[in-house]
Image (cartoon, rainbow, N blue to C red):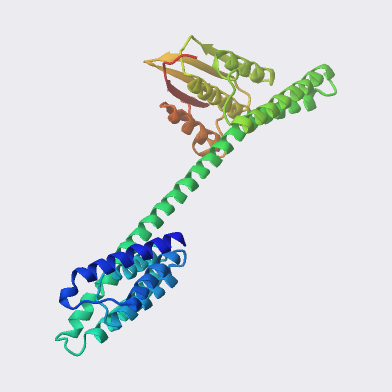
């Protein structure tokens, strides 16, 4: 309310000063004129949270001021400010209707004040509507711009949420899929040798227990941070991963020379080997897998292949795991390729940019 009182005081002062400067031209302002000017300012500022009502009050006070014969002046700014606020805060379809009503009201007021000596009343009335139409145009432009910015922000947030969900799905797939594949392999071995070789069945059950515990720990770490742990990646982590797959019954030939990768790239290399060996366990049948992590023309080649009967159900091109791997590799500036091998089998190759220090 203090702002409304201040605005009324400023407007009344400006109006009195303007009328006083033009008193020689017949301009005059009495007590009731000052009251109308103050009322226009009070409703315009005091009702700014209800812009339509503020505009209605401003139009009423300004119309009464003009019809009473008082000289035009700063009081017209109340009508302008109120119209701008309506257009800025309300949708254009709604504010356009309000603008039309306000424009008709303003035109009728000035015509009634100026008649009968007005030569071209239609042109005069049309020109007078600029006091309403122009602030409406500016306010509507501000409203549309703000709405577009808000929609863009919502779209960006939605895309970020979708990307995060996809990333989380990929993390769950990587963390759980590999472990479940090993568990399924060990369970099959245990069922096969349960009666004839109980010692082997026991070993498989112990491996199931170990693998399930490790997979559960991976899921917990993933849910806590959504990033591979420091000890998971790197040459040591890849060696442990290959040993786990060998223990599940898949022969793996590992060729790994000294290479230099960033922590992020090592984590990607780990996921490439993990997902590829998981697919070999699931889809390739009886075979031998070969894993290579070697320098290649300024890059680091991470390659996993087999000589089995290939991926099933179109996993070679459309599997969720391979799609996720491609995204991971490209995110660190690498290149990814996967497809059947000449002579049978399947191969996954990722070329990661060399450099950085662990």
- Determine if residue 314 is in view: no
Near-viewer residue (258 or 51): 51
Near-viewer residue (93 or 316): 93
Residue for point 75% across, 28% down: 187
- Determine if residue 67 is in view: yes
Q: Residue furthest bottom?
A: 116
Q: Position of residue 190 (x, y in %)?
A: 78, 25
Q: Is residue 258 above or below residue 163?
A: above
Give the image quarter of residue 35.
bottom left
Q: Is residue 38 left or right of residue 109?
A: right
Give the image quarter of residue 59.
bottom left
Near-viewer residue (252 or 7): 7
Residue for point 31% across, 65% down: 13
Q: Is residue 240 above or below residue 41?
A: above
Q: Position of residue 161 (x, y in %)?
A: 52, 44
Q: Is residue 93 left or right of residue 285?
A: left
Q: Is residue 241 left or right of residue 80?
A: right
Near-viewer residue (75 or 213): 75
Q: Is residue 330 left or right of residue 227?
A: left
Q: Position of residue 309 (x, y in %)?
A: 56, 29
Q: Residue furthest top?
A: 258
Q: Position of residue 343 (x, y in %)?
A: 48, 24
């Amino acid at each position: 309310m203090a702002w409304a009182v201040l605005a009324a005081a400023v407007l009344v002062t400006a109006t009195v000063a303007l009328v006083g400067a033009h008193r020689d031209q017949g301009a005059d302002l009495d007590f009731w004129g000052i009251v109308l000017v103050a009322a226009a300012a009070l409703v315009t500022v005091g009702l700014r949270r209800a812009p339509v009502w503020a505009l209605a009050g401003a139009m009423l006070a300004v119309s009464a001021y003009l019809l009473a014969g008082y000289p035009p002046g700063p009081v017209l700014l109340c009508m302008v400010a109120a119209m701008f606020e309506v257009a800025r805060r309300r949708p254009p379809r709604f504010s356009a209707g309000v603008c039309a009503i306000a424009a008709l009201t303003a035109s009728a007021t000035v015509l009634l004040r100026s008649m009968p000596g007005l030569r071209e009343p239609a042109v005069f009335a049309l020109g007078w509507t600029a006091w309403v139409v122009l602030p409406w145009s500016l306010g509507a432009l501000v409203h549309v711009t703000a709405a577009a910015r808000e929609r863009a922000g919502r779209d960006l947030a939605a895309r970020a949420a979708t990307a995060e969900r996809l990333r989380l799905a990929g993390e769950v797939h990587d963390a759980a899929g590999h472990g479940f594949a090993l568990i399924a392999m060990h369970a099959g071995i245990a069922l096969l040798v349960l009666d004839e070789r109980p010692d082997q069945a026991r070993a498989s059950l112990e491996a199931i227990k170990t693998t399930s515990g490790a997979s559960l720990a991976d899921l917990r770490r993933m849910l806590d941070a959504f990033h591979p742990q420091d000890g998971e990646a790197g040459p040591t982590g890849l060696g442990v991963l290959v040993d786990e797959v060998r223990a599940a019954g898949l022969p793996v030939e590992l060729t790994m020379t000294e290479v230099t990768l960033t922590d992020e790239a090592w984590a990607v290399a780990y996921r490439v080997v993990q997902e590829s060996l998981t697919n070999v366990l699931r889809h390739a049948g009886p075979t031998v897998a070969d894993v290579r992590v070697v320098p290649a023309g300024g890059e680091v080649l991470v390659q996993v292949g087999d000589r089995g009967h290939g991926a099933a159900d179109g996993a070679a091109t459309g599997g969720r795991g391979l799609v996720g791997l491609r995204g991971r590799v490209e995110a660190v500036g690498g290149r990814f390729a996967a497809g059947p091998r000449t002579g049978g089998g399947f191969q996954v190759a990722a070329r990661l940019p060399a450099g950085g220090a662990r």
